[in-house]
Image: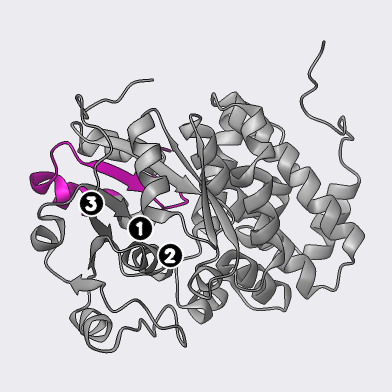
Amino acid sequence: MSDKGMGSKQLIAEYKVTVVGGGSFGSALADIVAANKFSVRQWMRSQSQADEVNQHHTNTRYLPDYPLHPAIEATTGLAYALEGSDVILVAIPSKSFRTVVRQMRPFVQQQMVVSTTKGIEADSFKLMSQILEEELPTATVGVISGPNLAKEIVAKALTATVVASDSDVLSQTLQKLLHTDYFRVYSSTDRYGVELGGALKNIYAIVCGMGNALNMGANTQSMLMTRALAEMSRFAVMLGANPLTFLGLAGVGDLIVTCTSPLSRNFRVGYAVGKGKSLDDAEAELGQVAEGVNTLRLVKTKADELGVYMPIVQGLYAILEEQKPIARVIRQLMLGEQKDDVEFILHS
């Protein structure tokens, strides 16, 4: 395996970690790193939010009722946040990801830089780690993805995630920084598959939230998630991912939690739409970014371009973007082409 940008650098005893982003998942990771007794600075846009973290050790906008480790140092100064960092965790919404990463460029040389964002860039259809490679060419790049609801992490519920990179050093470092008795870190070399799975599942969480609002039964929800997994893997393999990645935490694991938990932002958007709210009102009520809405538009366009069969994506697009009645779209889905149950078969 390559360790681009790392030279002969090996695992070191002490790390300085920077979390770029003041949202729920960034705060949850900062909390773990601090609890593991590593130095951690967290960059935030809002001075009042940074003051709250420093003075009260809480982030009530994103993680109300959950205390954060007092060793987290929050700042609005990006240069200061990145000064002396060995590992940088980037937790910025996809719409502003490139802009912030570009601002980081003067302060990043050969650090390990890891995306935690589950999204796709609108104009280029690039994943966040691809943006990191473009904007920070000397850095060693990785991604974190998995069934990781931030509120459950800070509540110390048993959780697992996947770190994916071409670099063994990066993967081992993240395991050292983040492993606790309640948070387990697995590794993968299929960075593209892990990251694409994290982005795609947000679409289907909206669908399942909608189904929950319409009181669809367990049979229906099970069917939706299973067919969603087939669509996700079919699309991802067309783009070069390993289909077996979707049997792991970043695939089926993330899909299950996002499609079943009301803590999922995308599930909540779908639930609100299913209850009759407009998409704009549902997003406004959420007050946070629901990456699945943007991802839906991009994936629908790309699937059309590549000729990939994605009936659930097409149906959700018809509901959210074309304002088609939900009942009519569901009926069309049930009358659609019946494909094989298992998308990829291993032959002996």
Label 1, residues with CA under 10 Å away: few <14, some 14-19, many ≥20:
many
* Image location (x, y in percent) of residue 311: 75, 43
Above or below 91: residue 276: below
Kindly indicate whether the residue at mark 1 contacts the one at mark 2 (C-beta within 8 angstroms). Answer: yes
Amino acid identity at mark 2:
Phe
Residue at position x 45%, y 54% in the image: 179
Magenta stretch, residue numbers: 98-126
Amino acid identity at mark 1:
Ala
- Residue 122 is covered by the magenta coloring: yes
In screen coordinates, is 159 left or right of 256? left
Read off the residue under disc 1. 91
- Residue 113 is covered by the magenta coloring: yes
Local SS, label 1: loop
Query: Is tag 2's residue or tag 1's residue first in the polypeptide sequence?
Result: 2
Numbered disc in front, either 2 or 3: 3
In screen coordinates, is 284 left or right of 170? right
Query: Is tag 2's residue or tag 3's residue first in the polypeptide sequence?
Result: 3
Query: Is tag 1's residue or tag 3's residue first in the polypeptide sequence?
Result: 3
